[in-house]
Amino acid sequence: MQKDFFKYQAKTTFFASGFEVDRAEGNYIYGKDGKAYLDFVAGVSANTLGHSHPKVIKAIKDQVDKYLHVMVYGEYAMEKPVQICKMLAENLPDPLHTTYLVNSGTEAIEASMKLVKRYTGRQQIISFIDAYHGNSQGSLSLAGRDTNKVPFEPLLPQIDFIRFNEEEDLHKITSKTAGVFVETIQGAAGFLTPKNNYLKKLKSRCEEVGALLALDEIQPGFGRTGKLFAFQWYDIVPDILVMGKGMAGGIPIGAFTTSKQMMESLADNPKLGHITTFGGNPVPAAAACAVMHELLTTDLMDQVHEKEKLFREKLQHTCIRSINGRGLMLAVQLESPEFTLEVAKRCMEKGLIVFWQLYRNEYMRISPPLTITKEEIENGCEIILASINEVLNERS
């Protein structure tokens, strides 16, 4: 299988591991080599409840037995898509009560970019240095690193960039700005969190000039920081909330939520302001309902703080320079990208899956399923520390 993987399937880099997956269950992925690998990545924050969670699997099977795709998005009323939109409305603050279901976080960003232009009648969009919102042409236009964009130019015009957590840049948001797109926690940059009420000041500036604030919660959403969405820690309400990844526990899905009035502007002049064939598919919607129900009826989100605290207590080493992030969305800074990649390789050999950040490869990603246990955290941290020591010993 590995040989065919490298021969026939497109790669995103020249250093894909080609790890052969046999099955995945709970907080472990099992390889064709017969070994169990503790998962500290969760499919890059997608497997909120771990792998093959029985309630998610049951929801998928129940829906598959009824029907799959029946009609292009927005025409027919189907139980599970309606249910997940209602569940979101009941658990989000005013006026975030209308949800458009799409296929991925990237598509949700694309549609939200259209929405801010359509609703305000303006054209300029503000994004952030080191931002990452996806890799399609529109979302890539919001990316805050030129090295990722230059080979694909020209991208969308009238997009300008400011610095995250830098208040002196807020004046660049003006009456010409349609919308500001910001990650509640900057992901690819190393899980950078807002400081000094930055998000409140950002929202205030948007309100002053009539610009819309779109919060990208594709990674921190669905309990990863200990609340349903990370913005709920920061005493603000965005105009548009964008989500994806962990929403359906490992099934492709995305969505954006806003006010009914704002969303209706996409439905007319022109009609079909956004349209998607498979968005709102009942199978991922059923999975999303199961994930939401589990998060809302258990103490998984309440456990996040103590699990974060345990990670920070256990990951003490002279080579660990800092740990960014919040909840179960942590980035461990090591001395260099090369060092981090070598440590990740050693961890894999010892049965632990870790990864690295897209822009800042010196940061090791730790984003396990919310179902991770304290014992598993302790075991995984021991593997990380042992792997760091191995790499150091080989140098000496």
Image (spheres, grey):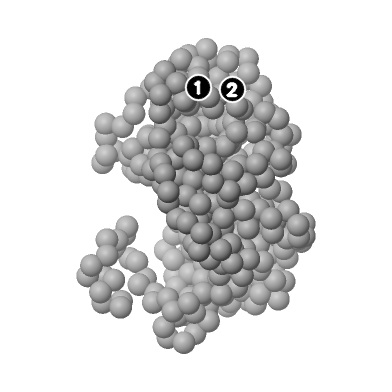
Q: Secondary structure at mark 1?
A: loop
329, above or below 74, in the image: below
Q: Label 2's element? A: helix
Residue 230, image x, y percentages? 66, 44
- Residue wearing tag 2: 261
CB under 8 Å between discs 2 and 1:
yes
**Residue at 46% of width from left, 37% of height from top?**
75
Residue 156 showing in the rendered view: yes
Task: Report whether residue 27 is seen.
Answer: no
Q: Position of residue 164 (x, y in %)?
A: 56, 35
Amino acid type of the residue that numbered disc 2 sits on in the rendered structure: Gln
Q: Position of residue 374 (x, y in %)?
A: 72, 71
In this view, the residue in front, 58 or 40, is 58
Q: CA distance from mark 2 to mark 1?
A: 7 Å
Q: Give amino acid for label 1.
A: Ser
Q: Quadrant of residue 194?
A: top right
Question: In which quadrant of the rendered image does the N terminus lie?
Answer: bottom left
Numbered-mark total = 2
Q: Which mark is residue 383?
A: none
Relative side of 183 to 269, left or right: right
Point 60% across, 33% down: residue: 98
Residue drawn at (37%, 71%), measured in percent from left and top?
17
354 vs 96: above or below: below
Q: Which residue is mark 1?
A: 265
